[in-house]
Image (cartoon, grey):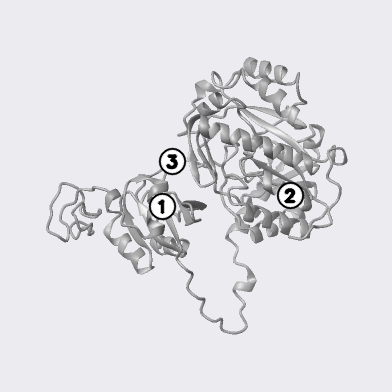
Amino acid sequence: MAPLSAPERSCGSTAGTHPCFDDAARHRYARLHLPVAPACNVQCNFCNRKYDCANESRPGVTSVLLDPQQAADYVDAALRHQPRLSVVGIAGPGDPFAEPKVTLDTLHLVRLRHPELLLCVASNGLAIAEHAPELAKLGVGHVTVTVNAVDPLIGARIYSWVRHEGRVLKGTDGAAALWERQQEGIRALKSVGLTVKVNTVIVRGVNDRHVPEIARTVRALGADLMNPIPLYPADGAVFTAEQAPDARELLRVKVEAGEHIPLMTHCARCRADAAGLLGKDDPVLAQILAQSASRVPAELVEIPVPAAPPLPLPRSRVAVASSDGLSVNEGLGKASRFLIFDLDGTGARLAGERPAPPKGEGRWTAIGELLSDCSALLVSEAGLRPAGLLAESGIKIEVVRGNLDELAHAALQGVSLEAWRAVSACATCSQGNKGPGAGNKACACSSGAPCSGGS
């Protein structure tokens, strides 16, 4: 992208206008989060993005997802309703740089239309360093990097896995790789003049005594501000309510951290689709957001001449149903998302994450359209009818279990997946085998043929 003419975005020039970076501004200026980044490259033990409650204010959740064009249109409509809107940010629901093109395209469109707005981004920092120059060109003034540990031994207790350079890293290897990249990211952001805030999630008995060291270390890297956040116990996450600090513990942590770096003390733990004044989301903006996500652009309706049929997309990718990002462990009917992989020469590379269509009439057709660039879908189990319908859409259903990266790589190379094929008992299969299970699952016989018995 070419550099854009944008207003000065130094910390001093925005004092009093960014509600997250200035306590007084939160009563006068509104912010808008654009939920355009669903994929994530780190699995934190305090995070579960699967559940979304409209009454729940925490990072990582959203009611809808927008593409860049929808997001820019949403900003237009939001400004007409809320003239006090001063800042537009991207904070998930995954990480904005797990799929950087979507994030950068969105920021580019918003900057072109609204050069007066502040732009900001929140990230885990794993993949942000290389994008710092582009963020500066786009006039992004503020970046939040979440750093929960600077000691890999502590980080290993916080992060389940880190996906870096096509590999899944666990334990201290993952935590060390993440911290190394976070350091590079903070230095890179400061080198191009951006204001950097560090968020730290406080987990009792894990990193609560470690926060002062984080504060001292990130300040030395150039961070401007720190925001210690108490653990929000999410349903289904590893960490529980017992590990959330109480008011006295939180105060102690903030006092100790504040000896090293200025603190943000008014955080509202915003959702990825937050809109309005900090802590007082605007219900009208929520309605505008919902309309923006479901709206059909006029140019797709009013076509003056018959359009030529689109060329079929090359099916160069594979999709995977996985609940943990490490293994193929979800059935087709239960999958809430699909991980998309392509081949980068050295192995399977995560290209993105796509939410599964809702259950109900037309679900299989919708999945076929969603995965139109995929030749195969790897699942732990599948019914005969949906597998057949998806096969008609050009998607081969592979019922397998095992390591996600190995299976995706094998499928992309066209290697037989027989060694990983899931053993699911069936009532009657096409080979005449019998078993005690429901008859609509993949057969465990040598042919791997789907069952013909059952519903």
Q: Position of residue 427 (x, y in %)?
A: 16, 52
- Tag 1 secondary structure: helix
Distance in Å between CA atoms under marks 3 and 2: 31 Å
Q: In this view, does 401 lie to the left or right of 131?
A: left
Point 34% across, 49% down: residue: 331
Q: Residue 276 carries which label?
A: none
The residue furthest front is 346
- Tag 3 secondary structure: loop
Residue on which the image places disc 1? 408
Q: Is residue 111 left or right of residue 342?
A: right
Q: In this view, does 327 lie above or below 224?
A: below
Foreground pick, 138 / 37: 138
Foreground pick, 207 / 50: 207
Q: From the image, which quarter does the C terminus lie in?
A: bottom left
Dot 1 or dot 2: first in sequence order is 2
Q: Position of residue 432 (x, y in %)?
A: 12, 58
Q: In this view, does 206 lie above or below 7?
A: above
Local packing at callout 3 (Cα closer than 10 Å; few below 14, some 14-19, many 20+) is: few
Dot 3 or dot 1: first in sequence order is 3
Residue on which the image places disc 2? 135
Local packing at callout 2 (Cα closer than 10 Å; few below 14, some 14-19, many 20+) is: many
- Tag 2 secondary structure: helix
Point 35% across, 69% down: residue: 392
Q: Which mark is residue 324?
A: 3
Point 50% across, 76% down: residue: 311
Point 81% across, 39% down: residue: 28
Dot 3 or dot 2: first in sequence order is 2
Instruction: Give, as a three-letter code, the residue at label 3.
Output: Asp
Mark 3 and 2 residues: CB-CB less than 8 Å, in contact?
no
Mark toward the viewer: 3 or 2:
2
Q: Position of residue 150 (x, y in %)?
A: 62, 27
